Structures are given as structure tokens and as C-alpha cells.
Image (cartoon, rainbow, N blue to C red):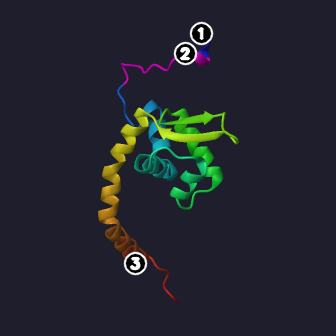
Amino acid sequence: MSQEEQPFVLDPSRPMDILDAACPSRDVFVDLADKWALLMLLSLRERGVQRFSELQRSIGGISRKMLSQTLRTLERDGLINRSVDGRATPPLVQYALTDLGGEIAEETRVLCTWTHTRAAKVHEARVAYDRRNAPTAG
């Protein structure tokens, strides 16, 4: 088995610490913390299996380039599955959550609920901050 084919094994003597830049959990967290990743996972959880163009429409404001990059990252991380039906013309490419992706998509519900209920307070805080920090005319 080549080095590329060997599975990744965590060092059991090293505790996970997401704040440690060298911790393996950190790069997973960074992938998930990307704004497009969470929105994509949410869309797949809420709307189910989707084609590329369906995903792009469901996530307002994402470019085709960012959609492609995010899909590749999530597929590499084992969170989504890309399936291709070559019998169709053109080939039918669809994206779906894996079991692992479904787990994290479900966990994002708490963040979504908080965001829905607290968005007004966050916007109020932004306005207050901007007023306090506005350049003075003079």
C-alpha cells in the first residue's frame, strides 16, 4: 500500500484541541466554517438530492466557481456524495448528503434557529457599532 493509500490515523496520545493550529480537527472545522459549506449542507438537508444548477439556485448569491470548489471540498471530506448517471444525455450528476454529512447538517439546525431568532439583535448591534465608530465630520 502506497503512502497515499494508507488511512489517516489520529495519534491517541494527543488530545483534540480545535484551537491548536496543528490539530487535525482544525482543518475539518475550517472547511465547515466556510459560509458556502454550511449553506450547501443546509440546502441538501432541506431539499434533498440536487443537481448542480438546483443547488446554485437554492443558495442565492453563490458563483459557479465557489459552488464547484465547495462541492469538491465537501465531497473530499466525505460529507456529500456526487453520483453520475452516464446513461442520460447529458450525464445526470447529482449531489446528496452522506450519513456523515447528514449528521453535521442536522447539527447546523441549532445555529440556523439561533440565527433566525437573533438576526434582528445582531443587526441592531451593527448599527450601534457603526454609529459609535463613524468618522466625525470636521
Indicate whether residue 117 is drawn in magenta: no
Type of the residue with mark 2? Gln
Contact? badges 2 and 1 (CB < 8 Å) = yes
Direction from residue 72 to residue 119 in the image, left or right:
left
The quarter of the displayed image where residue 87 is located: top right
Q: Check disc 3 and report the residue beneath it.
A: 132
Q: Check disc 1 and report the residue beneath it.
A: 1
Q: Check disc 2 and report the residue beneath it.
A: 6
Residue at (62% x, 34% y) in the render: 85
Q: Nearer the viewer, residue 26 or 69?
A: 69
Indicate whether residue 12 is drawn in magenta: yes
Residue 4 place in picture, x, y as percent: 61, 19
Q: Residues within 10 Å of mark 2 (few under 14, many from 20)?
A: few
* Magenta-drawn segment: 4-14
68 up-or-down from 59: above or below: above
Type of the residue with mark 3? Arg
41 up-or-down from 60: above or below: above
